[in-house]
Image (tube, rainbow, N blue to C red):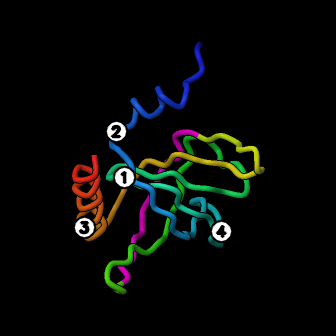
């Protein structure tokens, strides 16, 4: 089976992404505490997360972060699934996450993210 290249991964995404450097906290469903990570980019259906250690593929995680607009923080709580992961030359890991469950407010923010992407493309 051929390995997916970056180009084919881009083409297989369910939505486009925009660069979005943002600190976040995540934990596995069975974990007791949250771990710090960094969101690299985000779209209406998912995001790319920069991690210190490799996550398990297809595992589900809880994610917490804030979207900030005009100094107003919008908290986002999401249930996500790890759909891909790769190790980078700096020793960190990049993981693609798919949103599985968002609150009603978070779904609105996800839709707004899609509209912003449409304007920038």
Query: Is residue 75 highlighted in magenta?
Result: yes
In the rendered image, residue 111, in percent from the top left (x then y), is placed at 23, 58
Q: Are marks 2 and 1 in contact (CB under 8 Å)?
A: yes
User: On the rendered image, what quadrant is the N terminus found in?
Assistant: top right
For label 2, the crowd category at 10 Å Cα-Cα, with few meaning under 14, some 14 to 19 and many 20 or more, is few
Residue situated in front as seen by the camera: 88 or 79: 88
Horizontal placement of 54 versus 113: left or right?
right
**Residue at 75% across / 44% down in the picture?**
89
**Mark with earlier residue (1, 4):** 4
Q: Residue at x 56, y 55 (%)?
A: 49
Question: Residue 55, which numbered label?
Answer: none
How far across and down, in percent of the image, does residue 87 sit?
71, 42
The residue carrying mark 2 is: 14
* Element class at badge 1: loop
Tell me, yes or no, whether the two marked residues, 1 and 3, touch with CB atoms within 8 Å: no
**C-alpha span from label 1 to label 4:** 22 Å
Measured Cα–Cα span from mark 1 to mark 3: 16 Å
Residue depicted at x 66% and y 57%: 51
- How far apart are the alpha carbons under marks 2 and 3? 20 Å
Residue located beneath label 1 in the image: 43
Left or right: 65, with 107 as reference point: right
Element under label 3? Answer: helix
Q: Main secondary structure of the magenta part?
A: strand
Q: Which residues are magenta?
A: 73-84
The residue mark sitting in front, 1 or 4, is 1
Q: Which mark is residue 35?
A: 4
Determine which residue is flagged by label 3: 104
Give the camera-side residue of 60 and 99: 99
Q: Nearer the viewer, mark 1 or mark 3?
A: 1
| Earlier-in-chain disc, 1 versus 3 | 1
């Amino acid at each position: 089976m051929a390995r997916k290249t970056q180009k084919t991964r881009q083409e297989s995404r369910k939505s486009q992404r925009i660069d979005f450097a943002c600190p976040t906290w995540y934990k596995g469903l069975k974990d007791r505490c949250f771990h710090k990570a960094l969101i690299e980019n985000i779209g209406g259906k998912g995001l790319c997360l920069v991690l210190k250690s490799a996550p398990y593929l297809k595992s589900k995680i809880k994610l917490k972060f804030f979207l900030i607009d005009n100094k107003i923080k919008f908290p986002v709580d999401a249930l996500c699934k790890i759909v891909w992961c790769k190790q980078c030359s700096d020793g960190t890991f990049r993981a693609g996450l798919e949103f599985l469950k968002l609150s009603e407010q978070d779904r609105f923010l996800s839709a707004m993210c899609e509209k912003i992407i449409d304007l920038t493309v």
